[in-house]
Image (tube, grey):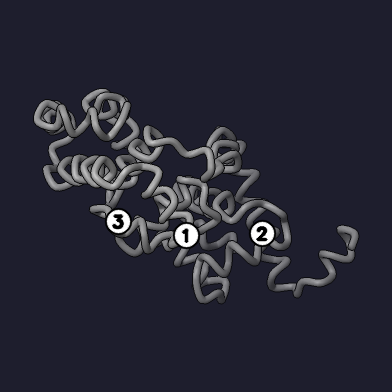
Amino acid sequence: MNTQDNLQSFDKHTLHIATAYMTAKETVIEQGYADEIDWQDCLDFNDITECFFLRESAWVILSAGMNERVIKNKFLAISSAFCNWESAAIIVKNSLRCRQVALAIFGNIKKVDAILDTARILKERGFQTVKTEILEYGVDSIRQFPYMGPATSFHLAKNLGLPLAKPDRHLVRVARKTGFPSPAVMCDRISQVVGDKVPVIDLVIWRYATINRQYLNLF
């Protein structure tokens, strides 16, 4: 089936949303976020390492309910506090020091302790076991970790390279505005039209929403 035939197989509503997505993507790229799109596009769960898992888990934990810029400005120092995510075993071994240094940078005790608990679970269960279970059970397996709820578990799964969209408040609003039952269904539908991966579509819509407060008007 050629491109023209493929486009003709979709209704006007779907094509309108896909066109809006492409406009959002152009804006996101123009605003200097092309690297984010490339990063998300290149993720492959099979290539995920223990270091990467620890880092992305910490990012999701710290980002929950927080302004992204705040976390971004502190994350390099927080990474240093947690031994640059070298391994779960090293973080656990140095947990008292890691906790003390991290709390001096970011004073949320529950979140800092959640990062330490994530390292403990990873050390006890073994990274390969955890990775295998996530591949088999997806977000249900991720929810064994602290701070991994209905939205954050999907956020981490997406950041680990799984083909999922997260029910972020911005995506939920866009899905509702466009008549889809969930962000997952919406992103999958757009993916069928434009060919971008579902996590990339998730990222583009979320980033566009942070750039333009009137983002719903586009859709």
- Mark 2 to mark 1 CA distance (whole Å): 23 Å
Q: Is residue 182 above or below residue 26?
A: below
Quarter-wise, where is residue 192 in the image? bottom right
Q: Give the mark nearer the N terminus: 2 vs 1.
A: 1
Q: Is the residue under label 2 in contact with that under label 3 (CB below 8 Å)?
A: no
Q: Give the mark nearer the N terminus: 3 vs 1.
A: 1
Q: Is the residue under label 1 in contact with that under label 2 (CB below 8 Å)?
A: no
Residue 182 numbered tag:
none
Which residue does the image show at 55% across and 49% down from the upper left? 204
Which label lies toward us, 3 or 1? Answer: 1
Quarter of the image with the C terminus is: bottom right
Which residue does the image show at 75% across and 75% down from the upper left? 11
Residue designated by label 2: 191
Considering the numbered disc 1 on the image, is that residue within a helix, a strand or a loop? helix
Q: Position of residue 201 (x, y in %)?
A: 58, 53
Which residue does the image show at 36% across and 59% down from the upper left? 141
Residue nearest the observer in this picture, 155 or 13: 155
Residue designated by label 1: 136
Q: How many marks?
A: 3
